Amino acid sequence: MRTRALLVVFSLVLACGCTADGGAGPDVTVGGDFGARPQISFPEGEPPGEPRSSERMAGSGEVVDPSDLVVAHYTAHVWDGGDNRLVASSFERGAPAAFPLNQSVTGVSRALQGHRVGSRVVAALPPQEGYGPNPPGGLTADETLLYVIDVLGAFPPGAAAQGTGGPGAVAGVEVAGGPGERPALAAPDGAPPADLRTKVLVHGRGAAVRQGQLLVVQYESRIWGSGAALESTWQTGRPKAFQVGKGAVIKAWDRALTGVRVGSRVAMVVPPELGYPGGLPPLVKPSDTLVFVVDVLAAY
């Protein structure tokens, strides 16, 4: 299993500007510091007809693998030789974005693979490398996109949180397994508690999670009284990322995860009103109490 340093010292060195296949990178000028919104100057004329990418700053972290979940700040422009309008920016949202490379836009996935955490990558994507014939709203099928991506972190399928602690229980739910291990849950017989119950089983050594940050997590869930996993990132092999404290996840997660330290494992028993009152996932009934174990891998 590869490990990921959460604090990376970036060597902000201009790279050669070559793509993996030896061609020239996109002929744009990109200024600004790593992690700050870039200043982009487009050349005159039409964009390239083939995909091009280059590394403009070289990082010193782990190498990005095709199976990774990448966390990055980015901007995306339509490169049309005219106003080259901005279509998306994580800087405007106030939090970075997550790119599961095996589910991302083809050109973005290809452009990021092989670079190190801490790198700035510039990629020009013609339509066939972008959204293809069915682009999202505001784009057309014949537009070239220009991405500037600052790679903040990369997390393989087996990424694990590290802290101190181990097995424990919350509201009678026994949770076996230590730091980095997939938890095993054993729920008691009887009625569940009526209110939210939470407990930190593994205490992380990182910074406390703040409202509005993007969290990278591994998690396991059960319906109270069921022995089968409802969801499990350990089972699917895909860590997930979400913004905490902004209504992007269930209320119980917003409450239970804000303030814990990165590297922690948090167990929670969630009453129905703090779960999915607005729209239930498959197999969950409105009256179900849910059990979660969440490992906080990183916060940005």
Image (spheres, rainbow, N blue to C red):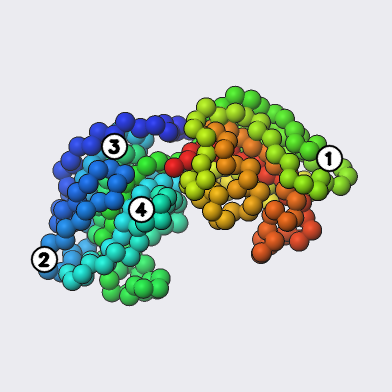
CA separation in Å, label 2 and label 3: 30 Å
Which residue carries the number 1 mark? 188
Q: Is residue 111 left or right of residue 199?
A: left
Of circles 2 and 4, which is in front? Answer: 4
Dot 4 amino acid type: Phe
Nearer to us: label 4 or label 3: 4
Mark found first going from the N terminus, 1 or 3: 3
Residue lying farthest right? 190
Asked whether disc 2 touches disc 3, contact meaning CB atoms under 8 Å apart, the reply is no
Estimate how packed mark 1 is, as few (under 14), some (14 to 19) or many (20 or more) residues with alpha carbons within 10 Å.
Answer: few
The residue positioned 64% from the left and 52% from the top of the image is 251
Q: Secondary structure at mark 1?
A: loop
For this orientation, the residue located farthest to the top is 164
Which residue: 31% across, 44% down?
35
Residue at image location 38% in from the left, 60% down from the top: 105
> From the viewer's perspective, is 156 left or right of 11?
right
**Identity of the amino acid at label 2?**
Glu
Q: Are the residues flagged by discs 2 and 1 in contact, CB closer than 8 Å? A: no
Sequence order check, earlier mark of 2 and 3:
2
The x, y position of residue 48, in whole percent, is: 18, 64
In this orientation, does residue 66 appear? no
Q: Which residue is mark 4?
A: 91
- Type of amino acid at the residue the image marks with label 3: Gly
Q: Quadrant of residue 41?
A: bottom left
Three-letter code, disc 1: Pro
Relative horizontal placement of residue 170, taking residue 109 as reference (left or right): right
Whether residue 287 is visible, yes or no, is yes
Please, what secondary structure does the residue beneath circle 2 have? loop
Q: Position of residue 145 (x, y in %)?
A: 28, 64
Is 177 situated above or below 252?
A: above
Please report whichever mark, 4 or 3, sits nearer to the chain's N-terminal start: 3
* Residue 44 disc label: 2
